[in-house]
């Protein structure tokens, strides 16, 4: 069974195959980026799913070789008091892409259909209003020409539990586990029902949900990126071949001695000395 300690790695893609295919897909993402930039497309990719389902690591692989001025990650904090009085979608709209941009939402307006509804952070009226308005909002994005893709990362309860335990033990990743994450563990079924209801109302032809099975993070990343690329009719943009011009010689310039500046200590040298 995938997700238990002994069998977790049994069906994983071998590292060398994974690395090669990931790099190939990332090269295609660079081509996609150039197509978006040159043609003025606007792309939004929504990443949603269970806590510890691997959304963040997938986003990291998507953006690893992309220009952060073109491909932006949006991970909004809790709304301010002022934002709580705004139309719910308002604070997300200001982060939508302009011409030639890609925006990846690490969680999005779907917070209202998930954690806000389950944990009681919004009223039942707020929740019902969201379910009515969200399909309209997303159809408006499509009519505006924004290319919207929505991915739900699905992880089993056993695998989520294993990842939570790993995070608790790892000081480099412990920050990923908040007290709120621990509180939501008791509401697994409630979150499942909320996700099902969300899909019923918002899995529409204009912006369908795509489910990524994420018990195996390597498979999830490759499957998600390959699918995203397959849904966008991008083409490789021809570029003029660049050639470095000769560097002109320094005339009447002498570089100041390094002793004039505050140098960073050579910590690396201490490693070589042992």
Image (cartoon, grey):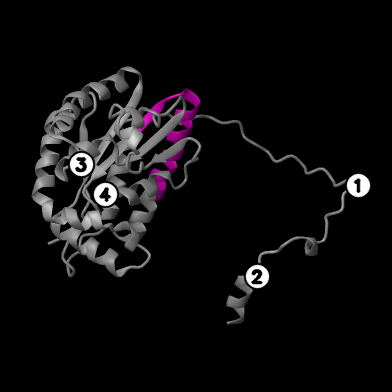
The Cα atoms of the two marked residues, 4 and 1, are separated by: 58 Å
Please give the residue where the numbered disc 4 appears in the rendered image: 220
Q: Residues within 10 Å of mark 1 (few under 14, many from 20)?
A: few
Q: Secondary structure at mark 3?
A: loop
Choose mark 3 or mark 1, whichever is in front.
3
The Cα atoms of the two marked residues, 3 and 1, are separated by: 67 Å
Q: Residues within 10 Å of mark 4 (few under 14, many from 20)?
A: many
On the picture, is 28 further left or further right than 137?
right
Point out the image quarter for the N terminus: bottom left
Please give the residue where the numbered disc 3 appears in the rendered image: 121
Mark 3 and mark 1 in contact? Answer it, CB < 8 Å: no
First to last magenta residue range: 23-44
Choose mark 2 or mark 3, whichever is in front.
3
Residue 57 in view of the camera: yes
Q: Quick one: label 2 or label 3, which is nearer the N terminus?
A: 3
Residue at (79% x, 64% y) in the render: 259
In this view, 62 is above or below 165: above
Please give the residue where the numbered disc 2 appears in the rendered image: 266
The Cα atoms of the two marked residues, 2 and 3, are separated by: 51 Å
Please give the residue where the numbered disc 1 appears in the rendered image: 252
Q: Residues within 10 Å of mark 2 (few under 14, many from 20)?
A: few
Choose mark 4 or mark 2, whichever is in front.
2
Mark 4 and mark 2 in contact? Answer it, CB < 8 Å: no
Residue at (60% x, 31% y) in the render: 240
Is residue 12 inside the magenta stretch? Answer: no
């Amino acid at each position: 069974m995938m997700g238990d300690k002994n069998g977790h790695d049994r069906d994983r893609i071998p590292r060398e195959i994974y690395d090669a295919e990931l790099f190939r897909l990332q090269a295609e993402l660079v081509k996609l980026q150039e197509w978006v930039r040159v043609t003025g497309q606007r792309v939004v990719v929504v990443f949603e799913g269970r806590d510890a389902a691997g959304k963040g690591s997938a986003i990291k692989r998507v953006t690893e070789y992309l220009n952060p001025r073109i491909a932006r990650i949006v991970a909004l904090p809790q709304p301010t008091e002022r934002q709580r009085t705004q139309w719910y979608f308002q604070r997300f709209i200001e982060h939508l892409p302009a011409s030639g941009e890609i925006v990846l939402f690490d969680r999005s307006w779907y917070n209202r259909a998930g954690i806000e509804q389950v944990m009681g952070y919004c009223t039942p009226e707020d929740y019902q209003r969201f379910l009515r308005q969200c399909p309209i909002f997303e159809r408006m994005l499509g009519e505006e020409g924004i290319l919207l893709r929505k991915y739900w990362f699905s992880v089993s309860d056993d695998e989520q539990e294993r990842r939570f335990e790993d995070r608790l033990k790892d000081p480099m990743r412990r920050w990923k586990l908040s007290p709120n994450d621990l509180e939501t563990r008791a509401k697994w079924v409630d979150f499942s029902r909320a996700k099902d209801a969300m899909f019923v109302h918002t899995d529409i032809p204009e912006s369908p949900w795509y489910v990524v099975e994420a018990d195996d993070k390597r498979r999830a990343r490759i499957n998600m990126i390959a699918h995203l690329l397959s849904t966008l009719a991008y083409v490789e943009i021809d570029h003029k071949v660049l050639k470095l011009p000769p560097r002109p010689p320094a005339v009447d310039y002498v570089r100041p001695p390094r002793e004039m500046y505050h140098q960073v200590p050579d910590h690396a040298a201490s490693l070589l000395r042992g």
